[in-house]
Image (tube, coloured by chain):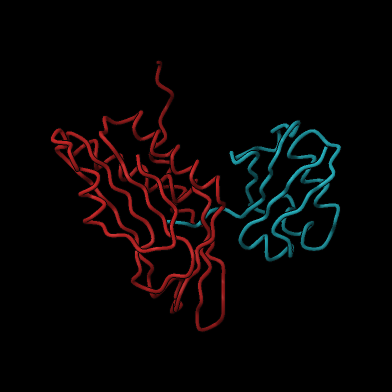
């Protein structure tokens, strides 16, 4: 399936991309993160186990188990700091 | 409910008046305004830029207001948050809650603000004398949000 993946704030800058279309054959958020980590470099570093980041699926906060079947929009971002 | 993400400044008095307009059952309005400081983590802050996730931000803010309305007896609420480049002293966020009685208004206002800090997708980048830096999330914000969680109540 094709996923639209967005990156925000510090992670957008580290990855050097704000948005991409990603061909993906996994099933869950955890699978997608594995695929992104496999790119190495900043991807492997920032998304490593123990690093704190958030994932949203269709604009709702997701967990590693969240399924991506039919998912239109994924976002990966740092913990929020508004207010 | 009025939920808005905007670059422009806002006026607390005007927002409170709009919240109360035509509602003579309003007995209490509680409000909070958060402002950009000139110092953070020991550094002078010259300016900050707020980024957000368009679409998710509005949904998240509306969800917080809906949660507050389900939990307390509210008449109406306004949540405004600015994005873009802000200078020290500039207002960033406004939460105003109208209810019949102060207890509901005060609690709901505090809840919305605490929940916003950990759940609404905004990020701050500061300009300091040492360069730019992204603000890190604070454990104290998680603790503030956690104080509103409680065991599930039977419906």
Q: Residue at the spot x=51%, y=76% of the render?
A: B127
User: Looking at the rendering, in which quadrant would you find the C terminus of chain A?
Assistant: bottom left
User: Looking at the rendering, in which quadrant would you find the N terminus of chain A?
Assistant: top right
Query: What chain is the red one?
Result: B
> Closest to the observer: A75 or B3?
B3
Q: Position of residue A67 (x, y in %)?
A: 72, 31
> Closest to the observer: B3 or B32?
B3
The relative height of residue B3 versus residue A44 in the rendered view (above or below) is: above
Q: Is residue B17 left or right of residue A5?
A: left
Q: Residue at the spot x=60%, y=41% of the render?
A: A59
Q: Residue at the spot x=40%, y=20% of the render?
A: B153
Q: Going by the picture, which residue comes out furthest to the top?
A: B155
Q: Going by the picture, which residue comes out furthest to the bottom?
A: B129
Residue B149: image quadrant is top left
Q: Position of residue A79 (x, y in %)?
A: 57, 53
Q: Is residue A1 left or right of residue B143?
A: right
Q: Is residue B153 left or right of residue B133?
A: left
Q: Position of residue A16 (x, y in %)?
A: 74, 65
Q: Position of residue A55 (x, y in %)?
A: 65, 45
Q: Residue at the spot x=38%, y=61% of the render?
A: B92
The colour with which the image depicts chain A is cyan
> Closest to the observer: B91 or A53?
B91
Residue B36: image quadrant is bottom left
The relative height of residue B108 versus residue A80 in the rendered view (above or below) is: above
Residue A27: image quadrant is top right
Q: Going by the picture, which residue comes out furthest to the front?
A: B22
> Closest to the observer: A73 or B155?
A73
The relative height of residue A21 versus residue A17 in the rendered view (above or below) is: above
């Amino acid at each position: 399936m094709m996923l639209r993946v967005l990156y925000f704030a510090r992670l957008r800058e580290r990855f050097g991309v704000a948005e991409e279309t990603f061909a993906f054959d996994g099933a869950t958020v955890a699978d997608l993160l594995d695929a992104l980590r496999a790119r190495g470099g900043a991807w492997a570093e920032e998304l490593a186990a123990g690093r704190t980041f958030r994932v949203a699926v269709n604009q709702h906060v997701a967990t590693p188990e969240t399924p991506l079947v039919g998912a239109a929009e994924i976002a990966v971002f740092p913990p929020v700091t508004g207010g | 409910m009025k939920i808005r993400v905007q670059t422009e400044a806002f006026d607390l008095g005007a927002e409170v008046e709009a919240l109360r307009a035509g509602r003579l059952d309003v007995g209490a309005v509680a409000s909070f305004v958060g402002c950009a400081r000139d110092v953070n983590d020991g550094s002078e802050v010259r300016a900050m830029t707020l980024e957000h996730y368009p679409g998710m931000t509005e949904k998240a803010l509306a969800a917080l207001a809906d949660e507050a309305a389900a939990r307390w007896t509210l008449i109406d609420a306004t949540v405004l948050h600015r994005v873009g480049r802000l200078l020290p002293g500039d207002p960033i966020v406004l939460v105003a809650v109208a209810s019949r009685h102060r207890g509901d208004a005060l609690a709901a206002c505090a809840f919305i603000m605490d929940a916003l800090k950990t759940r609404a997708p905004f990020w701050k980048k500061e300009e300091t004398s040492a360069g730019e830096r992204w603000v890190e999330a604070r454990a104290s914000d998680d603790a503030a949000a956690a104080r509103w969680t409680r065991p599930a109540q039977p419906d």
